[in-house]
Image: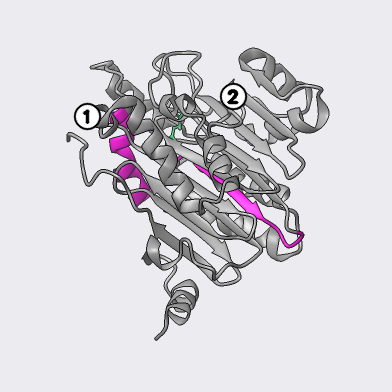
Amino acid sequence: MNRRTFVKLVGAYAPAFALPQQLLANSNDTIKPIVISTWEPNKKANAKAWEILSAHGSALDAVHQGVMVPEADPDDHSVGLGGHPDRDGHVTCDACIMDHLANIGSVMCLEHIVHAVSVARLVMEKTPHVQLVGEGALQFALLNGFKKENLLTPKSEADWKKWLKTSKYDPMTTVRDIEKRIKESHDTIGMIALDENNNLSGACTTSGMAYKLPGRVGDSPIIGAGLYVDNEVGGASATGVGEEVVRICGSHTIVEAMRHGKSPKEACKLAIERLIKIKGAEKAKEIQLGFIAINKSGEIGCYSMLPEFTMAVHSAKGEQIINSDYFFESSIKK
Ligand code: SD4
């Protein structure tokens, strides 16, 4: 069985089977339309995006509707409804969206609204601004017909009350939880799609790091950090400890590396290496970061600091899961 047949079989018959990245990344075996997302469980979001792409829809509509799937899922404790709250028990969401014309919109620290990405799209399409935060973002959403809801579910509230007993904020606790969570639910979603008209768009949405300080904003709603798309080059998105993604303008760095000839995977690796250079290996190997990228030809790639990161892909070949290559073998202190 050659590689092409194997990939096709996996796509058609074994959706949960994870492929090593070298089987797909950096290959010339590209295909459009295509959608990629951070983390295996977001294959459900990809499936929604694929419905739109395969019905001749736009990449923008595909990423918008795709990321709404985990936003509405109460069992996803990193996004929208059911997200883990800040240290005071408030679920505050960050989201952004970017299209092929470099139109952008984002909301930060938005409470009470399930679909933060839809508010971000409205910021992009209906205001002269690109970012709204906190109370202002909420007022804008309510004025535009969004419903005020309680995003703290009994499960996320119970987890928070358990955390309150120690009240110790450790971003890597959140990241360690990822390993557990991805087996059972989902995680922060960054999604990029390339449609049949050769246009790229991306979206990213999260409830951020669990038990963060009130008012904390991560990388996910920051254009250039959690997400960046350049329709001439490609797009990238990030997950992991947001402070570190912001430090290196992660997604923009990756797109610029692709502009200068790197493959998507090489570009993701370059961003990881840049952070290691800044932080030093000892500190860097305590931080989980994962990047996904796609170029204009539909070539895809991903790379992470530590093991366990996955990328979900959906195209006419079906659904594929790619186990990301990573820089440090294993470093998380359990
Ligand atoms: C943040 N990058 O708020 C997000 C968290 C995340 O998987 O990606 N979690 O920092």
Q: Is residue 271 visible?
A: yes
Please state which amino acid type lies under the numbered disc 2. Answer: His
At a point 45% along the width and 65% down the height, the residue shown is 24
Residue at the farthest bottom position: 1
**Magenta extent:** 172-197
Instruction: Say whether disc 1 or disc 2 marks the residue closer to the N-terminus.
Output: 2
Dot 2 falls on a residue whose secondary structure is loop
Q: Quadrant of ligand 1?
A: top left
Label 2 Cα neighbours within 10 Å, binned few <14 / some 14-19 / many ≥20: many
Quadrant (top left, top right, bottom left, bottom right) of the N terminus: bottom left
Q: Nearer the viewer, mark 1 or mark 2?
A: 1
Q: Quadrant of residue 17?
A: bottom left
Please state which amino acid type lies under the numbered disc 1. Answer: Glu
At a point 75% along the width and 54% down the height, the residue shown is 58
- Which of 250/46 is in front? 250
- Residue under label 1, please give it: 282
Q: Is residue 261 above or below residue 237?
A: below
- Which of 299/195 is in front? 299
Measured as percent of width and height from the top left, residue 278 is found at 36, 26
Q: How many marks?
A: 2
Instruction: Let me know if residue 196 is in the magenta part.
Output: yes
Please indicate whether residue 212 sits to the left or right of residue 33 in the image.
Answer: left
Checking the image for residue 249, the label placed there is none
At a point 41% along the width and 59% down the height, the residue shown is 322
Q: Quadrant of residue 212?
A: top left
Check whether the beta carbons of the residues at disc 1 and disc 2 lie within 8 A of each other. no
Quadrant (top left, top right, bottom left, bottom right) of the C terminus: top left
Please indicate whether residue 76 sits to the left or right of residue 181 in the image.
Answer: right
Label 1 Cα neighbours within 10 Å, binned few <14 / some 14-19 / many ≥20: few
- Residue under label 2, please give it: 112
At a point 73% along the width and 37% down the height, the residue shown is 102
